[in-house]
Amino acid sequence: MSVDTKILQNEVVRRRTFAIISHPDAGKTTLTEKLLLYGGAIHLAGAVKAKKASRHATSDWMEIEKERGISITSSVLQFDYQQFRINLLDTPGHQDFSEDTYRTLSAADSAVMLIDNAKGVETQTKKLFEVCRLRDLPIFTFINKLDREGRDPLELMSEVEQLLGIQCVPMTWPIGMGQSFRGVYDRENKLIHLFKAAFHGQKKLMTQTISLEDAETATLLGDHAMSTLRHDLELLEMAGTPFSKDAFLKSTVTPVYFGSALTNFGVEPFLQSFIELAPPPAAYSSDGQTVAPESDQFSAFVFKIQANMDPAHRDRVAFMRICSGHFERQMEVKHVRLNKTIRLSKPLQLMAQERQLIDEAYAGDVIGLFDTGQLRIGDTLCTGNPLHFSEVPHFSPEFFAKVRIRDPLKRKQLKKGLDQLSEEGAIQVFYQWGMGEMDPIVGAVGVLQFEVLQYRIENEYGAKITLERLPYDLARWVQGDFDAKKFSQRERSLCIVDRDEKPMVLFKGDWSLRHAMNDFPQLKFLLTAS
């Protein structure tokens, strides 16, 4: 049953779907938790590697994440704030899991770039910023850890502008840092938010606000902090770039906020500004045609698959971004890749590992679907005429290892585990040419993925394995008249097939690849599967 057009438009316009990007240890998981806290989704925040509390971060649901204190999976976190429905896509910060982050960004309408006050723009931040730029995502910047000593804020903004090529407009301004941190000045509302740490950051922080012109301001801040603040504000007014929402939506300007996610300071003013500035769901493109979010036609694509979120039931959940229209439980949709009709009977709203069945959702929402194995990353689901959304990014692995099983009787469990984890996109599975499924080879973008693979195969599928690292660092799909037997005689390469039995070759470095291209000019060596 189609929903009223007016209701559809109203629901779409109140959606906000975004992801947080950062270098590892910039405080991404902590900021995620605090946004949930102020959004009312949780009432007590956990801290990563908490010393004062025994809680773990809500978004880190996998046991290995809790043990290591890092995020290695993407989580979907949904909550209401004022009249808005927020879909927060929490992504892995560790660079070894950047492929998962890249895929998640394909489902976001905006991004929050988190920067460490002491370290500035770091390697992973630059990489993820470029992905956001490819999609023209509007970007907010939150400079974190003001409760610690760090670099001059003007210097940090200059670095962002020079390295990332985007103009910075400070919406708030810090008053001191570290031991001398007094708070931030809200430039739009012309109010000072006074800093006070409390509750180890686990509960909402009630901040005191005063005007710059109040008689008691100088007493509360101190003469030096007051003088420095007035000087900084005058400099920003004279030399700074004025904020333009149009420029922000075109990704040429980033609004900058300062705060401390650990102590909750600056989080609430940021969240309030975010919902006012962040764009509603954007249109997607299908075969050159624009699909508007308020269209009557339902459409969505799968950007992530996660197995075993509930270890007791060994389930498998596909994460789906709704691109247009209205979703209803039990609706029938077209699975475009398989050219078949399927019923979506168990849609889920997720809060990390927790989930509840929902009856409806709208464009901009991210929901989970119980999957029996027929969905893949990048699949399009729709009603009406078939749509084909742009392919979700897929990376060629750079690290390889041979999987050896310790107990041959557990080979069936190993195969099931490798199949499911490869469909998640956690790793890629290959087999040596002519060897069948004996001793599979796994490929990863980062080496930590191997550690997670071994942990999950043993704990989720009950098969103990060892990983034997292979001396290859390049993988290419082969197109053309390929004689694998002849090619396999080469010393610096290995012939394999992927899960779809497409031929590939692993190479020991660029020199080996160039040599093969010269020796076999009739072949094409491709970075992605054609």
Image: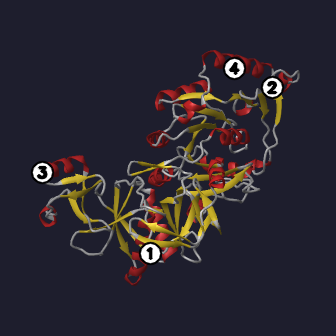
Please name the residue shown 31% across and 54% down the image.
528
Could you tell which of marks 3 and 1 lies nearer the N-terminus?
1
- Neighbor class of circle 1 (other Cα within 10 Å; few <14, some 14-19, many 20+) is many
Residue designated by label 2: 221
Could you tell which of marks 3 and 2 lies nearer the N-terminus?
2
- Residues 382 and 518: in front is 382
Residue designated by label 3: 521
- Residues 140 and 95: in front is 140
Q: Callout 1: helix, strand or loop? A: loop
Q: Nearer the viewer, mark 3 or mark 1?
A: 3
The three-letter amino acid code for the residue at tag 3 is Pro
Using the numbered discs, state the Cα–Cα distance from disc 1 to disc 2 in whole angstroms.
Answer: 60 Å
Q: Nearer the viewer, mark 1 or mark 2?
A: 2
Going by the image, does 179 lie left or right of 503? right
The three-letter amino acid code for the residue at tag 2 is Leu
Q: For residue 262, what is the image quadrant?
A: top right
Image coordinates for residue 62, horizontal then vertical, percent: 58, 64
Q: Nearer the viewer, mark 4 or mark 1?
A: 4
Please name the residue shown 64% across and 38% down the image.
277
Quadrant placement of the C terminus? bottom left
Residue designated by label 1: 464
Q: Nearer the viewer, mark 3 or mark 2?
A: 3
Residue designated by label 4: 233
Q: For residue 498, what is the image quadrant?
A: bottom left
